[in-house]
Image: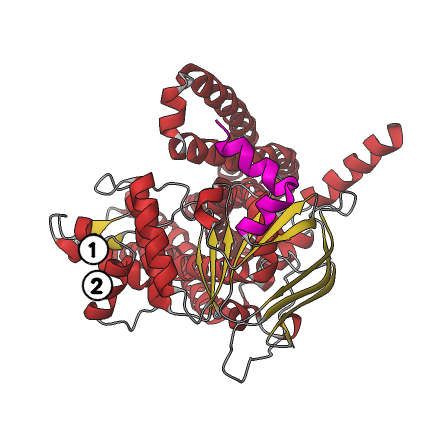
């Protein structure tokens, strides 16, 4: 237990270093932006030049004014005006450069950086196995792509400000301070390292709280997404208070971690300001003494005091950057963890011939969990054009067979062949292009009815879309919509019922016109009358197409050419509906349990 605690402490210390593995990777990710960063560096150098020139010029003007008080010679305004004009120009240039640099970093570099990461994450998700999406809450993924990437993009400004502008400006000002008067430079420079070290230590203390804050943020987004996606169920069962309490508790934990992180980050600047104030007081007192006792020109003292103030500005920026980088690193860790996930292998093989639809599963074994075998030595031989139904109790492996056919998951052993070609040699996209598919859970995107139906065949004509809808018995209700086929709908649309949405997805599969068809509980949301119409449509339209039907409602598969009865991942019976009833075996018991009454 103690060694585990020491290991965690060591890991936390490694993570808390400013340039740990995550920090170095953040910097390396900025290589494509080096041109913009070099331009920002050049602007920073000009800003430093302005920052150096202002105190020197002010000190010179103060000296001139002091000398005038002693001589009272005429022409003071004439002698001061050129210097004041130059000073005004420097202030104007400084403001313009500051605005330009901020615009460059925040509106060009950061946004480009942000968009690039989101594109990479999107491409990464496309290459990840379906198992990752099955195991990871949608809200967690959205939180990483949106909030975490936004926080990472902000890191550019902080890193440039710290590693370039801040330290460079401090170095230049420190040199000028010693050149101007080394006695007054000492208290300013001695107090600075102490304040920087203290601020860096306090900044790293907040990193563990930011890690927790971002993890809880992902959970919070997932909970909100879950609550509103299942809003009708929450209302129906009267669980509003329970969900609200759960959300409040998680939100409070999220808030507390943010408070601790923000406190440790925010307290850094007051510490820096306190150290700067001590240095400012020391320089002012020492400068007064040097004027009186050592005859140092007042203009020199004013110059040093102004430079001391200029010295504190980059310190405060560095303090802010040090505290903020810990915040950014916590977000970056989560994004990099997603980018570093192992991708599924994908061969580049193509079919290369006209597929007839002969599908074989040979000695297939599969399990989601290696310790819990699901499908064992499964053998299926489906001839071209056959309508094959797969039935069985919940958990028998029916939907798993579909996942294997579509290569959402790969078999643990054995082969799946299409017309004698091992699908393991085909690219996943090539394999999936052979299937049209209708799932139990309908999915419609925001767009017109015609666009939704044509999703699997974007080049389809309006006539082909309407013919597919007519075949799927949804043309009649589409024409009753406000704009017919041009009515905008979505998954949450109330304009169409659940059964009508299912019919639209069936029309989509029919329009795709692929040699293989999978219906996974496709009639679960369809009423009895529509189910009868659908059966007629399917009998007419599955000619020449191999069709797999996963069904709990056995009435939907009585006309299937072959019924495979699964139990505990094995085929226990197979045959036609009539022959299986005649056997009075497991299928007979399933059918009887649904219709005996």
Query: To which residue does mark 1 refer?
Result: 475
- Please indicate whether residue 506 sits to the left or right of residue 405 in the image: left
Image coordinates of residue 217 in percent, x first then y, are 51, 35
Residue closer to the observer: 105 or 577? 577
Secondary structure of the magenta portion, mostly? helix
> Do the residues under discs 1 and 2 have CB atoms within 8 angstroms?
yes
Residue at 20 percent across and 68 percent down: it is: 462
First-in-chain label (1 vs 2): 2
Residue 6 position by quadrant: top right
Mark yes or no: residue 94 visible: no
Residue found at the very far bottom of the displayed protein: 352
Dot 1 lies on which element? Answer: helix
Q: Is residue 503 above or below residue 514?
A: above
Residue at 76 percent across and 41 percent down: it is: 11
- Please indicate whether residue 490 sits to the left or right of residue 435 in the image: left
Mark 1 burial class by Cα count in 10 Å: few <14, some 14-19, many 20+: many
Q: Is residue 311 above or below residue 245?
A: below
Give the magenta range: 577-597
Point out which mark residue 466 bears: 2
Mark yes or no: residue 330 visible: yes
Residue closer to the observer: 524 or 428? 524
Residue found at the very far front of the displayed protein: 582
Please check the rendered image and state whether residue 578 is part of the magenta-colored stretch, yes or no.
yes
Image coordinates of residue 197 in percent, x first then y, are 66, 40
Residue closer to the observer: 46 or 289? 46
Image coordinates of residue 447 in percent, x first then y, are 25, 55
Point out which mark residue 234 bears: none
Question: CA separation, marks 1 and 2?
Answer: 7 Å
Please check the rendered image and state whether residue 463 is part of the magenta-colored stretch, yes or no.
no
Residue closer to the observer: 444 or 241? 444
Residue at 38 percent across and 49 percent down: it is: 443
Dot 2 lies on which element? Answer: helix
């Amino acid at each position: 237990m103690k060694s585990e605690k020491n290991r965690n402490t060591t890991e936390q210390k490694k993570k808390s270093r400013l340039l740990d593995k995550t920090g170095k990777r953040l910097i390396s990710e900025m290589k494509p932006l080096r041109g913009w960063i070099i331009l920002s560096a050049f602007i920073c150098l000009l800003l430093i030049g302005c920052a150096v020139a202002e105190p020197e010029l002010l000190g010179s003007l103060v000296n001139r004014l002091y000398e005038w008080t002693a001589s009272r010679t005429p022409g003071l305004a004439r002698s001061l005006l050129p210097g004041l004009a130059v000073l005004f120009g420097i202030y104007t240039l400084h403001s313009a450069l500051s605005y330009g640099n901020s615009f460059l970093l925040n509106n060009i570099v950061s946004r480009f950086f942000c968009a690039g990461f989101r594109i990479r994450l999107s491409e990464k998700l496309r290459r990840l196995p379906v198992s990752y999406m099955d195991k990871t809450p949608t809200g967690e993924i959205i939180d990483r792509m949106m909030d975490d990437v936004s926080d990472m993009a902000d890191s550019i400004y902080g890193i440039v400000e710290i590693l370039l502008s801040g330290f460079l400006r401090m170095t230049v000002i420190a040199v000028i301070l010693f050149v101007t008067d080394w006695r007054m430079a000492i208290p300013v420079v001695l107090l600075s390292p102490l304040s920087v070290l203290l601020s860096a230590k306090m900044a790293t203390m907040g990193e563990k709280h930011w890690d927790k804050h971002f993890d809880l943020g992902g959970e919070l987004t997932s909970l909100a997404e879950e609550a509103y996606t299942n809003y009708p169920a929450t209302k129906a069962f009267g669980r509003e208070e329970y969900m609200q309490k759960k959300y409040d508790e998680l939100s409070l934990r999220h808030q507390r971690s943010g408070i601790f992180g923000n406190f440790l980050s925010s307290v850094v600047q007051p510490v820096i300001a306190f150290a700067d104030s001590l240095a400012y007081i020391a320089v002012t007192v020492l400068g007064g003494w040097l004027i009186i006792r050592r005859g140092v020109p007042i203009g020199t003292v004013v110059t040093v005091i102004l430079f001391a103030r200029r010295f504190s500005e980059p310190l405060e920026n560095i303090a802010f950057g040090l505290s903020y980088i810990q915040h950014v690193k916590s977000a970056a860790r989560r994004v990099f963890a997603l980018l570093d996930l192992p991708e599924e292998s994908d061969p580049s093989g193509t079919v290369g011939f006209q597929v007839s639809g002969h599908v074989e599963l040979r000695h297939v074994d599969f399990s989601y969990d290696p310790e819990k075998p699901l499908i064992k030595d499964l053998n299926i031989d489906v001839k071209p054009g056959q309508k094959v139904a797969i039935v069985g109790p919940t958990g028998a492996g029916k939907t798993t067979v579909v996942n294997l056919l579509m290569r959402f998951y790969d078999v643990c052993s054995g082969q799946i062949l299409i017309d004698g070609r091992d699908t393991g040699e085909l690219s996943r996209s090539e394999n999936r292009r052979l299937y049209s598919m209708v799932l139990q859970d309908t999915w419609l995107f925001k767009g017109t009815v015609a666009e939704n139906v044509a999703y699997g065949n974007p080049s389809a004509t309006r006539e082909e879309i309407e013919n597919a809808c007519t075949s799927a018995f949804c043309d009649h209700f589409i024409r009753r919509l406000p704009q017919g086929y041009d009515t905008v709908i979505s998954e949450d649309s109330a304009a169409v019922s659940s059964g009508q949405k299912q019919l639209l997805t069936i029309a989509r599969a029919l329009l795709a016109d692929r040699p293989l068809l999978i219906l996974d509980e496709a009639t679960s949301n369809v009423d009895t009358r529509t189910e009868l119409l659908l059966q007629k449509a399917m009998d007419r339209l599955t000619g020449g197409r191999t069709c797999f039907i996963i069904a709990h409602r056995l009435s939907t598969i009585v006309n299937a050419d072959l019924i495979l009865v699964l139990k505990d991942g094995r085929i226990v019976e197979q045959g036609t509906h009539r022959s299986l009833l005649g056997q009075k075996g497991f299928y007979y018991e399933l059918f009887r349990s649904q219709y005996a009454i």
